[in-house]
Image (cartoon, rainbow, N blue to C red):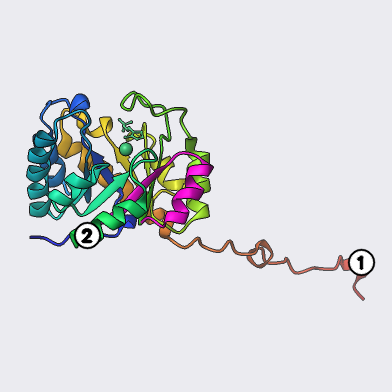
Amino acid sequence: MPSKNLNPKTWSVYFVTDRTSSASGNILQDVLEVARAGIPVIQYREKELPYSEKLKQAQSIKKICDRFGTVFVVNDDINLAIAVKADAIHVGQTDLLIAQVRERLRKAKLKMIIGVSVSNPRELKKALAEKPDYLGVGSIFRTKTKKDAGQPVGLTFLQHVSRTTRLPVIAIGGIKTNNLSAVLKAGAHGAAMISEISSSPNLFLRVQQLLHLAKKVNAQKQRPRKPIPRLKKLIKPKPRIKPSFHRK
Ligand code: TZP
Ligand code: MG
């Protein structure tokens, strides 16, 4: 099994499943394409499905993720996350408290990365006190994918979160190829996407393009800025020649 990169700061592009936004309608096929393209992380997020069906799908996705060295995250459902031995669990504000998640993991003798969503300063304060392993911030832009996403929080809030904490920050909501660069420049370590990936006619290519772009932007962010040379030193002073009538 290839090793997985368990540092959320390296999760530049993060795929979240959603059968209702999938062009193929087959999330296992989507997951396979996305994993094959080298995405570092996939989250299983399927609402309103019977547990037995979710379990079957999650088990298959876990296998694909293990085969490609992709981190496997389960959304919300701690029972499911434990049953499939996910690498990580992501909880929203209305889901379990992180303390409860930790207690369940301790009893199951499992270690998982824990992510939590924040969409305003109050939630940020609460989340920081709970000490998760990473933060999901959003919805950054308007999105049709999550009906109850509320008002977009925008790049300003994302920038505020990134400056407030040293925790890894993953942005979500309305992120597309054409705004990914702005999201990463605002301080996010990575961007989670549903429709931009799942509604693409070629998921493999789309993910490769997104990864390439994220790598370029993140490399620019990390490069130390060249100090601007002092102008004075650059402009050599012209030798002052006294007008000849002054010379003796
Ligand atoms: N949480 C906040 S916005 C969102 C979730 C799950 C939906 C993101 O979907 P899309 O299609 O990438 O905007
Ligand atoms: Mg949730």
Magenta segment: does it hold 16?
Answer: no
* Up/down of 1 relative to 137, above or below: below
Q: Is residue 173 visible?
A: yes
Give the quadrant of the C terminus.
Answer: bottom right
Q: Residue at x 45, y 39 (%)?
A: 119
CB at disc 2 and ligand 2 closer than 8 Å: no
14 left or right, relative to 120 = left
Dot label at residue 21: none
Q: Find residue 135 and report its horizontal and vertical position in percent.
A: 39, 49
Of tags 1 and 2, which is closer to the observer?
A: 2
Specify start and end residues of the magenta stretch as a single range.
111-132
Amino acid tagged 2: Lys
Judging by the rendered image, the residue that carries numbered circle 1 is 245
Judging by the rendered image, the residue that carries numbered circle 2 is 107
Ranked by sequence position, the earlier of labels 1 and 2 is 2
Labels 1 & 2 near each other (Cβ < 8 A) = no
Q: Find residue 211 and report its horizontal and vertical position in percent.
A: 26, 46
